[in-house]
Image (cartoon, helix red, strand yellow):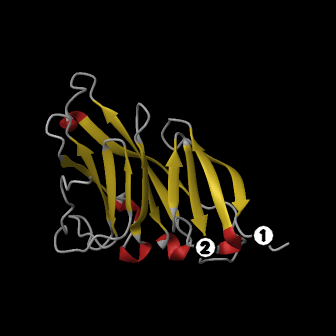
């Protein structure tokens, strides 16, 4: 039998998008038009972690794009999200399929913990470690919408795009900006 433990409220009067992911004790909720201090309407990804003592979900951090990149509400940051918490340093991926005039991108965040306080949620910190860009859309296809849907498992990141019905697979090697695309998979074959 399912029992309601907690709920994700509307945040700052903005409705949540249908982007929700959960893995282990980490949940991520994407919000496309979230208002943050440095910009309005750029979107965000709310990370919640389950407290082991109470069993309740608590907000750990709001993930946002780098403000220096000039992202706005049309970039759709937070449209798609996924998380893999089944590893020592969990990963969250956040799609921004409208970024750069609808070329799109996927932002990658990693959680690290302070070595002194490994059991406290407050000791955890999520930081952006890279960004995946499409490497397969033909030149001039300015509306690939890369990052419309995203997935992560271990160090493998998958993201879809509208152009040519392809999913791009990338790997994250654990270092800052250590992302490398290794395979494109066509999910509709016209043979």
Could you tell whether 15 is left or right of 101 in the image?
left
Estimate how packed mark 2 is, as few (under 14), some (14 to 19) or many (20 or more) residues with alpha carbons within 10 Å: many
Q: Nearer the viewer, residue 149 or 74?
A: 149
- Give the residue number, with chain letter if any, for mark 1: 189
Q: Which residue is mark 2?
A: 144
**Which residue is at the far front?**
1
Tag 1, which secondary structure?
Answer: loop
Label annotation for residue 133: none
| Residue 160 horizontal/vertical position (percent) | 59, 64
* Towards the viewer: 135 or 86: 86
Q: Is residue 93 left or right of residue 2?
A: right
| Residue located at (20% from left, 64% from top) | 37
Q: Position of residue 129 (x, y in %)?
A: 44, 44
Q: Residues within 10 Å of mark 1 (few under 14, many from 20)?
A: few
Q: Between marks 2 and 1, how big is the CA–CA gap?
A: 18 Å
Residue located at (21% from left, 25% from top):
117
Where residue 163 sits: x, y (%)?
A: 67, 73
């Amino acid at each position: 039998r399912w029992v309601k433990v907690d709920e994700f409220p509307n945040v700052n009067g903005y409705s949540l998008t249908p982007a929700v992911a959960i893995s282990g004790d980490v949940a991520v909720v994407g919000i496309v038009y979230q208002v943050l201090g440095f910009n309005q309407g750029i979107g965000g990804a709310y990370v919640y972690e389950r407290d082991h003592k109470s069993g309740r979900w608590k907000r750990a951090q709001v993930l946002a794009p780098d403000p220096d990149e000039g992202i706005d509400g049309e970039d759709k940051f937070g449209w798609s999200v996924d998380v893999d918490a089944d590893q020592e340093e969990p990963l969250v991926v956040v799609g921004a399929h409208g970024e750069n005039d609808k070329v799109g991108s996927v932002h990658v965040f990693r959680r690290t913990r302070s070595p002194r306080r490994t059991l406290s949620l407050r000791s955890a910190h999520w930081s952006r470690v890279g960004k995946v860009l499409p490497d397969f859309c033909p030149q001039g296809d300015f509306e690939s919408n890369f990052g419309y849907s995203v997935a992560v498992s271990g160090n493998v990141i998958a993201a879809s795009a509208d152009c040519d019905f392809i999913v791009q697979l990338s790997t994250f090697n654990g270092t800052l900006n250590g992302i490398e695309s290794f395979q494109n998979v066509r999910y509709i074959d016209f043979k």
